[in-house]
Image: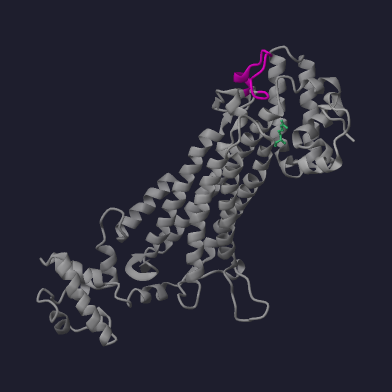
Amino acid sequence: MAEKPWDGRFAIPTDKSVERFTSSIAIDSRMFREDIQGSIAHSRMLASVGILSDAEADAIEKGLREIETEIEAGRFAYDDSLEDIHMHIETALTEKIGDAARKLHTARSRNDQVALDIRLWLRRETLEILDGLRRLRSVLVDLAEAHLHVPMPGYTHTQRAQPVLFSHHMMAYYEMFTRDARRFEDALTRINVMPLGAAALAGTPHPIDRELVRRLLDFPEMAANSMDAVADRDFIAEFLSAASISMVHFSRISEELILWSTSEFAFIQLSDAFTTGSSIMPQKKNPDIPELVRGKTGRVLGHLVNILTLMKSLPMTYNRDMQEDKFPLFDGVDTLKDVLDIYIRMLPTMKVQEERLKKACETGFLNATDMADYLVERGLPFRKAHSVVGKAVAYALSRGKELQDLSLKELQEFSGLVEGDIFEALSVESMINRRRSAGGTATENVKAAIRNARTVL
Ligand code: ARG
């Protein structure tokens, strides 16, 4: 059994069941690189202020690099009696280099050490997520650009409402994922803060140089209050909040892809490479990826509630409860990265059923608003126009027709303002391209949005 750093105070050894219960090594070992990076910066700083000799700091750095290689190669043994990654690495270093390793923890506590490790780890992961979001957004812009000629029904209440460009629909998701990226960038400014030097909670009497550690680890700022530095995990809650919102966006696009690939909609076809079959029904091709993404959204939302509940009512400063922060954080990061990756691969392989989308715009009275707008342009107040068109719709329905299938004479029965150019106004192309208001679906607007997105990306 490994000796405990707190052995001096204890008369009998820790019970095995306690070691198993309190151990976090199975989860936090994945921060080994950050732990080593943080320890090297700390030991260089200790040497620069004279607490360690240069030779000791060199031995520490060399030993830590060897341990890093051993862990990477899978040649490192984990043991619950050593609790967490911090104690595993420190113990291994002591076995390697002896007394110099016993000085490494001077002016440091696991409380500020773990806060540092999580921040270093999450900073790197957040940058990777930002890169994933950038690639996803560029896939959406590609889809928009490739389908500029494709109209589709736009929906409210899942009822056909007005025609829009398929590209406009894709660019709506581009906007959502762009805001997600902004949220991660903003969260990053609070993740990227250097806590080391807080020690257990109150700071340290040793003449440390926190500014040097900040520079060595490339943090733009350092935590201003030692208690806050070890007590809070709000940066994790912020990260998971941004991740949750992004997952909600993913679950919405997933829901649409699922609906669109039904034979009822048949707006898209997902590639065989990104669908699965049924073990009993030979005809089936199932949209499992969007379904799983929709399902995994619940996980990430749960992780956000987990971290908020974990931190709620904790007294200052560090409490062991906080060790539970890593599972929701790690799984939240892994889930979001998996989802980003699979969407970046899947979306470009999806086939858009252009004819089917066009046809869908021609039924269901998507041009009713446009007939009303036509009458408004000819002087009728909108409310009156609405009522006139309502009657025309009821009439057409009773004959199993669409507005554009009625004759000019029939349409004129409803209003004397109707003339021959009404049919042009009721066409899908005109409906789309007349919506030139800023942010509307007209082709020229969507083209400008795409150009704009390209310069941002
Ligand atoms: N494994 C602990 C965690 O993840 C490290 C900090 C332990 N600090 C302590 N005072 N026991 O939170």
Residue at the farthest bottom position: 399
Q: Is residue 60 above or below residue 183?
A: above
Q: Is residue 203 magenta?
A: yes
Q: Return the x and y of residue 179 as percentages of the image width and height.
A: 44, 47
Of 299 and 261, nearer the camera is 299
Q: Return the x and y of residue 258 as percentages of the image width and height.
A: 51, 68
| Ligand 1 in which quarter | top right
Q: Is residue 287 magenta?
A: no
Q: Residue at x 48, y 60 (%)?
A: 252
The answer to whether residue 161 is visible is yes
- Screen quadrant of the N terminus: top right
The answer to whether residue 218 is visible is no
Picture quadrant of residue 90: top right
Of 392 and 431, nearer the camera is 392
Looking at the image, residue 380 sits to the left or right of residue 350; the answer is left
Q: Is residue 295 above or below residue 453?
A: below
Q: Return the x and y of residue 37 as percentages of the image width and height.
A: 69, 30
Q: Residue at x 53, y 37 (%)?
A: 188
Looking at the image, residue 143 sits to the left or right of residue 118; the answer is left
Q: Residue at x 51, y 42 (%)?
A: 184
Q: Is residue 25 above or below residue 59?
A: below
Q: Which residues are magenta?
A: 199-213
